[in-house]
Image (cartoon, rainbow, N blue to C red):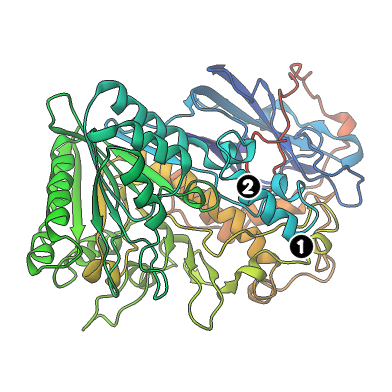
Amino acid sequence: MAISKIRVVANCDMTTIVWQLDEPIPECRGFALERQVAGAQGDAGDDFVRTWVGFEGGTHQPGESQPSTVWPIQRCIWSDYLVSQGQKVKYRVIPMVGPAASLQKADESTWSSWTDWTVVATGKTEGFHAYFNRGIVPAQFLARQADNSKDFDKMLTQDIRNPTSKNRLFLAGPLRDAILSLLAQAQRDGVQIFAALYELNDPEILAALKALGSNCNLILGSGAFSRGKPDENADVRKDLRENSTVQLVDRLVKSPHFAHNKFIVFCDSNGNPATLWTGSLNCTVTGLCTQVNNGILIDSPHIAGAYKQRWEELKAAGSGYPPELAKDGSTPAHDVLNRVPITAWNVPCLKYVDLADAAKYIQAAEQGVLFLMFNPGSGDGQKKAFALLQDIEALDPEKLFIHGVINQEQQSGKAASLQLVNRGTKLPAASMDEIVPKPLQDATKNWFHQEYRFAMVMIHSKVIVVDPFGSNPVVMTGSHNLGPKASAENDDNLVIIENAPGLAEEYAVNILGVYDHYQWLYSQSPKGKKAAEPVPAQRGPSFDGLKDSDQWQQNWLQGPRLRDLNFWLGNVSEPAQPAPPVPPAQPVGDRQSPTPRKARAPRRQTSATAHRRPRRKK
């Protein structure tokens, strides 16, 4: 059997399918990915997954897609963005043999088996629900709606503020649906919430908070204040006082502090804390739509109670930082929910004890570490603790799979930048203008349209996942930027969740989907090209589609890409053996190819590319 292993992993918004060859397939031009769907209605159907890149030299229309039987997949990992929440899906992989002009299915003995049914949903670890948005603005479906950067900015500025805009609804995705649903349920049940928010301006979230009236207890920070604007939330603060009965508490802190929390405690009908919402989401139009963010709902009354207690401490502190705030923040809350241990830190704390606690999980990694970070900062390990990024960088990339993206915000005299850690190697940081390169269209010979950026903050999630496919996976997330400033100076929170394999897989799918998108853009930037391995002379510097050859398989049978597959499949300890040569092929016409089951046309095309792209969008 040529395809020896296949696995599908899902979160609330997408699936990732991974497969492994046990030997090269003669004349293989790629793979067709067949999908079956059951359960909820959605955009995905029983058909072959579509792709957006054909063979080099081929003709195509802007945004054109074809079934993977026509434009096959020349890799062994694929993300399906067309699936919808609640759908059950399963997949199988079928090698397509060439030449490109007359592709046929390979002999059935080389096909993969069908995967088990997988539900596109969260809650795979009982008591934990993770939600993600689709806040990736440099994307094909958006780029085709504007002719230039000025028009793009104008369009998106209007759309993300319009609750009925299709672009807003798409970009905000399940994250918007989740938080609005939770707030609406609280209103229907007549229960109290206790929220501590850094920023607030999203019209739908603001309306939902107002609808709760006096049951909404809100600590509103001063946001990203500046010397000339001491309160970023001044207009919303005035609106809440004049046009609602929300119980508003001002926390107008000053430099070097930030009132940076993003949590909500939901109470039960008796007024007792019941569930906790936290994560990286700022309740703003950009937080929902134009930045990568996550939110998590934890069904632990004990952890919710600890956050409620912290809320009361912050209220009592006013706009200051009395010594007891850091003292109390130096002892975390603990709970075990459905045999899943939880540690919750509410900082500031003393002596960076939160970072020391988190670091021990990173240092104990056995398979790999995945992450998304925003402004993690750094320390010297003595007067100031190392940031968790530095702990990750200290790991051995020869033994562990280490992948992540870091977004550094614009600082005085310096442009905002994005930086990737690829298999443990920290690639040179590139500015946003480089990451969304103007020569993208030329570099890909018109397969892809020019893309635009909207703001300096693209990755805002703060999440680390250790050994997501191992025996004891760990997820860390919250508002905490995972560095010493957050630990010592800010209102922030960090939850560490152990032995939650379903939750870890949900986060892994999100992180690696985001990574793949920006890795593609980075590879087209000047620094990305310089950091890449030398390009073989026969390939040339530009991408012009799929190769009409079977030699592409070699990259997936050895070296770094084989290590990638081993990580996903949970067998990272297996050595990457040299790939056997592709054997000579029989004439294609001599093979017996089964008659394919009739594929149903997709209900709607997307405008994704072979790399990370949003789904379900014309």
Q: Position of residue 84 (x, y in %)?
A: 55, 28
Q: Nearer the viewer, residue 71 or 130?
A: 130
Q: Position of residue 530 (x, y in %)?
A: 67, 77
Residue type, numbered disc 1: Leu
Local crowd at mark 2 within 10 Å, few (<14), some, or many (≥20)?
A: few
**Residue wearing tag 2:** 158
Q: Position of residue 260 (x, y in %)?
A: 31, 59
Dot placed on the residue nearer the N-terminal end, 1 or 2: 2
Determine whether 181 is above or below 442 in the image.
above
Q: Nearer the viewer, mark 1 or mark 2?
A: 2
Whether residue 11 can be seen here: no
Q: Is residue 348 left or right of residue 574?
A: left
**Residue wearing tag 1:** 440
Quarter of the figure with residue 45: top right
Q: Nearer the viewer, residue 306 or 54?
A: 306
SS state under label 1? helix
SS state under label 2? helix
Q: CA distance from mark 1 to mark 2?
A: 26 Å
Residue type, numbered disc 2: Gln
Whether residue 102 can be seen here: yes
Quarter of the figure with residue 322: bottom left
Local crowd at mark 1 within 10 Å, few (<14), some, or many (≥20)?
A: many
Quadrant for the N terminus in the image: top right
Determine whether 81 is above or below 248 in the image.
above
Q: Which mark is residue 227?
A: none
